Image (cartoon, rainbow, N blue to C red):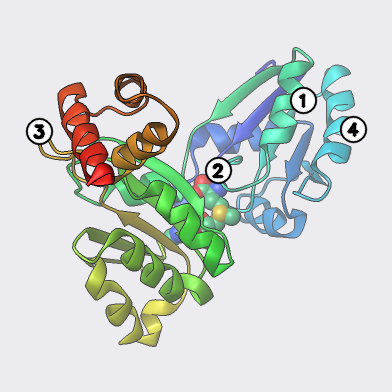
Amino acid sequence: MNHSGTLYVVATPIGNLQDISLRALETLKTVDLIAAEDTRHTAHLLTHFGIKSKLVALHEHNERRAGEKILLALASGQSVALVSDAGTPGISDPGAVLVGMAREAGLKVVPLPGACAAVTALSAAGFEQTHFLFQGFLPASGAQRRRTLECLREQQAVLVFYEAPHRVIESVQDIASVFGGSRQILIARELTKTFETFHRCTLSQAADWLRADPNQQRGEFVLLVEGALPAPQGEISPDAQRVLQLLLAELPLKQAVKLATDITSAKKNALYALALELEKTEHD
Ligand code: SAM
């Protein structure tokens, strides 16, 4: 394999080591350098597969500094594999900075696909909505988390969250309080590992289900939440109503309706009728 000067972005397993690809093994074996989020963690993986390539650390606190050294190695013709602790680098993991630097320097970047917790959970979810929106981790602070969720409430796509065990109940509660209790959630825990569990229920039931069994609060989580249903024909979503209200406060009715139609996907006639109603209420 001639891979001089190439940066390989290599996905590694999220639990079950047999999920590593043949191409990933071959690449990790033959590159000059492996840039790893945690060298000790990756050393275990390499030992398991009898791989002896040299490791360097590249994590969120040194990504740019370490990236510059790696760029020099690449520019001198060496090949480098980038890995994170688990799954696909750059997905809620370091990697984007180094890849961006390599691209800017005109170097070759080759991705090696493999495990990713989000896609693994989605493949076993059975949600019929075809779009999904990857949010990853929600903010740790409750107020910020709820603000983020409010921005996501109207999304008509399956929402994908990563969550840590000590915050999973809090997050599920906040999701239910912002989105309402009737949507479906799939709690995917410990994917590809011994205690892999899936539980699908309504948002109103999810926190109680987790609370009922401390074992279900352990390990790693992906939460998939059904997206908003499209507003029935003629109905206007709460977000579109808010846009219209804000515009009406500043602009003449016709202009406000035109802009609101452009900004939201609501029907012009429905917005027009609502604008007339709002103006009437204001003058009553
Ligand atoms: N880069 C990884 C990927 O491609 O999925 C994600 C890394 S992120 C730092 C770690 C989070 O991913 C965990 O807190 C959890 O939310 C999710 N995750 C990773 N492995 C998982 C697993 N085996 N089962 C469930 N969730 C997992």
- Tell me the CA gap for discs 4 and 1: 11 Å
Q: Is mark 3 within 8 Å of ligand 1?
A: no
The image quadrant that residue 107 belongs to is top right
Tell me if residue 283 comes above or below residue 248 in the rendering: below
* Label 2 vs 1, first from the N-terminus: 2
Q: Give the residue number, with chain letter if any, for mark 4.
A: 69
Task: Quadrant for the N terminus, please.
Answer: top right
What residue is drawn where x is 75% and y is 12%? Answer: 106
Label 2 secondary element: loop
Tag shown at residue 167: none
Q: Amino acid at mark 3?
A: Gln
Image marks 3 and 4: residues in contact by CB distance under 8 Å: no
Q: Is residue 119 visible?
A: yes
- Tell me the CA gap for discs 3 and 4: 57 Å
The image quadrant that residue 52 belongs to is top right
Q: Position of residue 43 (x, y in %)?
A: 72, 55
Q: Is residue 118 left or right of residue 157?
A: right
- Tell me the CA gap for discs 2 and 3: 37 Å
* Label 2 vs 3, first from the N-terminus: 2
| Mark 4 burial class by Cα count in 10 Å: few <14, some 14-19, many 20+ | few
* Label 3 vs 4, first from the N-terminus: 4
Q: Position of residue 46 (x, y in %)?
A: 67, 50
Tag shown at residue 101: 1
Q: Give the residue number, with chain letter if any, for mark 2.
A: 91
Q: Position of residue 245 (x, y in %)?
A: 35, 39
Tell me if residue 52 comes above or below residue 69 in the rendering: below
Q: Residue furthest front?
A: 284
**Nearer the observer, disc 2 or disc 3?**
3
